[in-house]
Amino acid sequence: MNEKRPIDCLRESAKKMEVGTADDSSAITEMIPIGDVLYIVKENGIYAVKLADSIDPKRLNPDIPNTQQRVLICGSASELVARTLLTANILFKKNFLPPTFNCEQAILLSFEALKDIVAMQEIKIAFQMSENSEIDAFNNRQQKQGVLTMPAIGNVLERCKSFFQKADHVSQSLFSIVKLFYGKDVGAKGFDSLANLATRKYGEGDAFARFAKDVVPRLKYIRNVRNSIEHPQPPAQVAVISDFDIRANGEIFPPMIEVTYRGEHYPLVSISLLMADAVDGLSGIFESMLAHLCNKHVLCIGGFTTQVVEFPPEQRRQENKHIRFSYGVQINEEIVPAG
């Protein structure tokens, strides 16, 4: 028998780690392993924990420590986190889904989507703060006779480009999860192909088929806006983006966007309002899509009918109260939480 080296004893000894930063003493509510990283979800942050063995698997350097790193400054107290990563962690369970389904990859894709949604949220907040600051400054400014000094955010095009790049990444991550379930049955037409598949497979009146059809225009809008901003081909494919602007009637408009994309015309809308709607809408679509997908593929557990259920707040885990969907089994005509 090989004797243990000092480094083996060191690595295999009991360890204690306090996860968090000086400004985050919130409670741990979930632990999610992805690959060789353990993600610790606290109420106000998400941390990546790596053990020394994952950094130095051959155990050559006894000075390699266990590490923790904050990767997001929002945690389970955020609905955005609950709608994506935490919902994925609840639903993508091997004992509830077919053995061919890659649960870890689906959780990883959900985490990537969360990072992009959080980035969208940060861009939105910064944009709204700049807009409000400019409006306040304009209202308090003494105007020179005959000359109006207009408010201006600056870099509006670049802000929109970054925002819609992130939004499209979320959509791509979601479609990658769809492909984990349906493989080659969905293809080049993206969510259109999912809507067509769901209608053929489950019928037009099916809740998932209706949902898949309803979300196509919203997800297509995100892709079309991104393409119009990144690859303008006037006049057929163009995004007209403006900072604060004054019209002939003297009315001052906030930053606006108007998009034309290959026969589709999306009317003029406030960028600030559009960003707010996109963050909320896209995270909600992500959450509902995971619930529908898992509900269509859930296995029968212990002989009981199993389904994905939206539980009322009083039946949710209080440490993760924003997670709306979970598995439930029907027992004596009553649905109770499973797992």
Image (tube, rainbow, N blue to C red):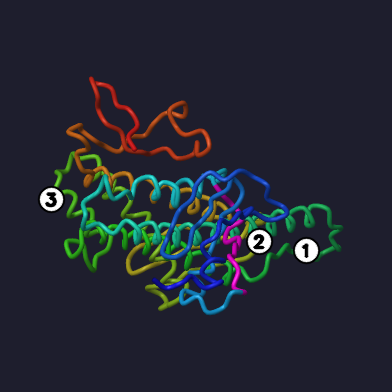
Q: Which residue has dot 1 on it?
A: 148
Q: Where's residue 152, x and y in %?
A: 70, 65
Residue at image point 49% right, 62% down: 116
Q: Where's residue 168, x and y in %?
A: 42, 64
Q: Which residue has dot 2 on it?
A: 246
Q: Where's residue 197, x and y in %?
A: 17, 54
**285 versus 153 height, above or below:** above
Q: Where's residue 62, x and y in %?
A: 59, 74
Q: How many marks?
A: 3
Q: Of marks 3 and 2, which one's residue comes earlier in the chain?
A: 3
Dot 1 falls on a residue whose secondary structure is loop
Q: Amino acid at mark 1?
A: Leu
Q: Of marks 3 and 1, which one's residue comes earlier in the chain?
A: 1
**283 versus 303 height, above or below:** below
Quadrant into which the N terminus falls: bottom left
Q: Which residue has dot 3 on it?
A: 200
Residue at image point 66% right, 61% down: 246
Q: Are marks 1 and 2 in contact (CB under 8 Å)?
A: yes
Q: Amino acid at mark 3?
A: Arg
| Left or right of 171 in this view: 131 | right
How far is mark 3 from mark 1, CA to CA? 60 Å
How far is mark 1 from mark 2, CA to CA? 10 Å
| Left or right of 146 in this view: 232 | left
Looking at the rendering, the stretch of residues picked out in magenta corresponds to 63-75
Dot 2 falls on a residue whose secondary structure is strand
